[in-house]
Amino acid sequence: MSSEVEQYINEHIPIVKKHNFQITEEVSPFIQVRGTLKDHINHRNSVFGGSISTSLIVASWASVRNILLTRGIPSGIIVIQSEHVEFSKPLIDDFYAELRPISEDRLTKFIAMINKFGKSRIKIEADVKDFKNNEVCASFTGEYVVLLNDTIV
């Protein structure tokens, strides 16, 4: 994984460390966030919905940051504008959040808008799956906005 992204996450998003999420880069530039049932268990012996949502938001946000870095944009303000999580089944195992593929065409347009206007938005889709069966337990759609700001690191 991009050490810059990992370092930034560890310094600026304390919930990742506090809740023992692991950050990996399975398929560049997309970030995967992993969690364990034991660290995120609720009163029903399943993963807490807030942990599922957090893993999806962090995986998506970190992937947007990594996309920017790999495309030569070292800084920017990345904010989530909207998000929706659909919980399809209880999650009773260790889990991971990962993005659905984004076409090269969409990524090229996203970066072109940033370079032309200093801002852009991108729709991200992601899923949380259990490690045991790789079944989708929750799906996420989020809209991220990026504003260029050369003073932000």
Image: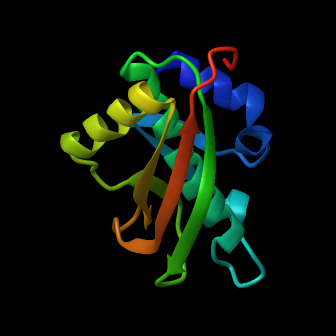
The answer to whether 95 is drawn above or below residue 4 in the figure is below
Lateral position of residue 126 relative to residue 144, left or right: left
Residue 35 in the image, given as x and y percentages of width and height? 59, 53
Q: Residue at x 27, y 51 (%)?
A: 101
Q: Residue furthest front?
A: 117
Q: Is residue 48 visible?
A: no
Q: Residue at x 54, y 82 (%)?
A: 90
Q: Residue at x 42, y 55 (%)?
A: 124
Q: Is residue 83 visible?
A: yes
Lateral position of residue 141 relative to residue 109, left or right: right
Q: Residue at x 47, y 38 (%)?
A: 64
Q: Quadrant of the N terminus?
A: top left
Residue 127 in the image, given as x and y percentages of width and height? 42, 63
Q: Quadrant of the C terminus?
A: top right
Q: How is the image coloured?
A: rainbow
The answer to whether 92 is drawn above or below residue 57 in the figure is below
Residue 79 in the image, given as x and y percentages of width and height? 63, 46
Residue 57 in the image, given as x and y percentages of width and height? 59, 54
